[in-house]
């Protein structure tokens, strides 16, 4: 057993302080960016809201864009958990996957923190793949196992889907497509995982369940490194 020394304890305190500072900055950035948008938010204002020194921000994030991506990572992971909670009683993995698709599409175009980052399409798609992917890929595998879905390589299918979501979100945000196009896009993405157009349309037309309130940024337990 390793000897517990004052140095070990000191390192532990430093790590805890760093984690708290990082979490506070992400929470503050989420609040400020929601209120003012990413472009109008300043690092000084975020640091002040987090109650840390202005220079401290740059110990954790190289730029405001990097901080915005960290916020997006937490939002996406939280969204996956909220969808999972809201659909816990659903027996059909295809229905849960449809809910997840429609919810992500809606959030990508309505949440200001997502919408302003859509132009960084590769980064947003990568974050979506990593943060929502474990939930979505597991659903696709469950659906394949039950014979309900035939997604092929589930990870590849989800990766393709993330890029499609970003593209659709950009088109709606820029006014190239109406918001109503998201439902049709969800149908097409559901067809990609082996559902017929008729079944996909039925799933996409069902009312979405009410998600629990967003709270992931109040209890961040990951990305503390």
Image (cartoon, helix red, strand yellow):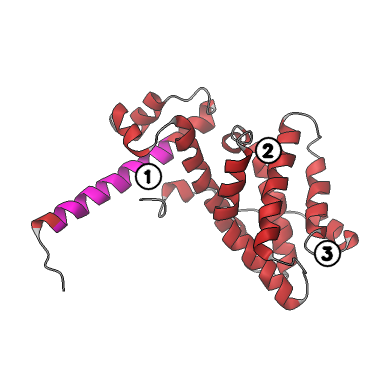
Q: Nearer the viewer, residue 1 or 86?
A: 1
Q: In the rendered image, which quarter is residue 42 located in?
A: top left
Q: Residue at x 15, y 52 (%)?
A: 10
105 to 195, vertically: above or below: above
Whole-percent x, y for residue 72 in the image:
53, 42
* Furthest-right residue in this view: 198
Residue underneath mark 2: 109
Residue underneath mark 3: 195
Q: Secondary structure at mark 1?
A: helix
Name the dominant secondary structure of the magenta segment. helix
195 to 163, vertically: above or below: below
Going from N to C along the chain, the mark reached first, 2 or 3, is: 2
Q: Residue at x 65, y 53 (%)?
A: 210
Cα gap from disc 2 to disc 3, whole angstroms: 25 Å
Q: Residue at x 53, y 53 (%)?
A: 77
Position of 218 compared to 164: left or right? left
Residue underneath mark 1: 23
Q: Secondary structure at mark 2?
A: helix
Q: Nearer the viewer, residue 120 or 109?
A: 120
Cα gap from disc 2 to disc 1, whole angstroms: 25 Å
Quarter of the figure that contains the N terminus: bottom left
201 to 145, vertically: above or below: above
Q: Is residue 146 visible?
A: yes
Q: Residue at x 25, y 50 (%)?
A: 15
Whole-percent x, y for residue 71 in the image:
48, 41
Q: In the rendered image, which quarter is residue 198 located in?
A: bottom right
Position of 192 compared to 223: left or right? right
Q: Which residues are magenta?
A: 8-28
């Amino acid at each position: 057993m390793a000897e517990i020394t004052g140095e070990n304890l000191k390192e532990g305190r430093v790590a805890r302080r760093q984690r708290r500072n990082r979490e506070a900055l992400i929470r503050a950035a989420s609040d400020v960016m929601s209120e003012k948008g990413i472009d109008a938010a300043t690092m000084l204002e975020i640091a002040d809201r987090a109650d840390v020194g202005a220079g401290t921000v740059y110990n954790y994030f190289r730029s405001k864009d990097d901080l915005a991506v960290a916020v997006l990572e937490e939002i996406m992971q939280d969204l996956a958990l909220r969808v999972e909670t809201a659909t816990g009683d659903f027996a059909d993995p295809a229905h849960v996957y449809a809910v997840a698709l429609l919810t992500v599409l809606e959030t990508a175009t309505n949440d200001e923190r997502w919408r302003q980052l859509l132009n960084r399409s590769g980064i947003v798609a990568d974050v979506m793949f990593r943060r929502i992917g474990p939930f979505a890929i597991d659903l696709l595998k469950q659906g394949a196992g039950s014979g309900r879905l035939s997604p092929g390589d589930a990870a590849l299918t989800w990766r393709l889907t993330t890029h499609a979501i970003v593209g659709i979100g950009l088109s709606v945000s820029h006014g190239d497509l109406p918001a109503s196009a998201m439902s049709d896009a969800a149908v097409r993405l559901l067809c990609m995982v082996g559902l017929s157009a008729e079944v996909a349309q039925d799933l996409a037309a069902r009312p979405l369940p009410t998600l629990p309130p967003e709270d992931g940024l109040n209890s961040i337990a990951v990305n503390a490194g």
